[in-house]
Amino acid sequence: MPQPYAAHRLRAQTLRPRPHLSVVGLAVTALVALTACSSSTGSSTPTGTRAATATATATASAAPTGPLGSAADQAVLDTITVGTAASGIAPTITLPTTPVSVSITSRKILTPGGGALSAIGGLVRANILLVKASDGTTLDSTYEGSPQSFALNPKNYLPGLANGLAGLNLGSRILLAIPASEGFGTAGRPDLGISGTETLVMVVDIVDVANAIPQATGTPVAPVTGQPTVTFDPTTGPTITIPAGAAAPTTLVNQNLIEGSGTKVTEGMFLQVHYTGVLWKDGSVFDSSWPRAQYYTFQTGTNSVIPAWDKGLVGHTVGSRVLLVVPPADGYGPDGNPPKIAGTDTLVFVVDILAAA
């Protein structure tokens, strides 16, 4: 699977502490760290590092809808009682006296919702209460903190979680059971109290759904004199022209070329973007997602991308086209990213923000 040459942050991942960071969020990060693959565009990844939350993703596709699981699995879900609770407080999950087990990922729609529909390849944000099916022990809850963002990619994330959250309307509440085979497998996650045979049971409230738009759309913004100029083709993407004879900026330049009207990006959200990157010194393209016809998915605030992306895209809105001029300190630092990017190179990106949740 191709990984963008430009955006991949070539260093070990160190998540920034966030209050109420859920076990589910840690689980997603852990699984992606094990399955992330190297770039096909020429970047090399130092031993022991991984792109913790970054994936190249095709357009959101058809997703499971309605209940999931066999009739026997649905009968198991019917033995689980979900209590109601005030807004912002986790509901209760009461299991039967015998341990719960399902053959495949199974879900029951408790509240159908009525907004946008989630899809494989898209993004959701959700509140989750997670318990162990073996004994009902609560592993975590996001209800008392902040909802968790997810990219619905079963190849890179817990397959049961990605498939279980697809095909749901905004506002849905579901009961979800994921067997070990579609969760953490036989290795489990002992550090989180999850064995290699543990079925996970969750109540999930879908609070946001985002599926990528094809390209930036919104209000054009007048270019800033002295900065690179950009023309755009919907197939090949942006063409970036560096101003002749101009010295590269020494601080990060962050400006809209198009101002979108969608969701405002905040730290911790997953984003889906299209981008092109060139070198200031000669205008040569070192990477672009447009020819691959695959947008790029990553989570802000996790050091999974270069600092300029983490700093420069937060605060913008979905639909925006953003120009980032990146000095080395906000890119790959003094080591660069050989063979294409030297430690002294200033980088120029044009990034279309296509979805955020």
Image (spheres, rainbow, N blue to C red):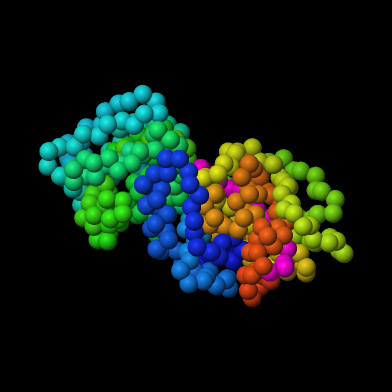
Is residue 253 in sight in this rendering?
A: yes
Residue drawn at 42 percent across, 44 percent down:
21
Magenta segment range?
343-357
Q: Quadrant of residue 287?
A: bottom right
Which x, y percent locates residue 312?
A: 65, 49
Residue 80 against residue 322 in the figure, above or below? above
Which x, y percent locates residue 18?
A: 48, 43
Residue drawn at 82 percent across, 48 percent down:
224
Q: Can you name the residue that lies furthest to the right here?
A: 245
* Magenta stretch secondary structure, dominant: strand
Q: Quadrant of residue 81?
A: top left
Asked if residue 351 is among those painted magenta in the image, a careful observer would answer yes
Q: Can you name the residue that lies furthest to the left here?
A: 98
In the displayed structure image, the side of residue 349 where residue 45 appears, left or right: left
In the foreground, 61 or 279: 279
Residue drawn at 65 percent across, 54 percent down:
308
Which x, y percent locates residue 75?
A: 17, 40
Asked if residue 248 is among those painted magenta in the image, a careful observer would answer no
In the displayed structure image, the side of residue 19 where residue 141 appears, left or right: left
Is residue 117 in sight in this rendering?
A: no
Residue drawn at 83 percent across, 61 percent down:
247
Residue 254 against residue 276 in the figure, above or below? above
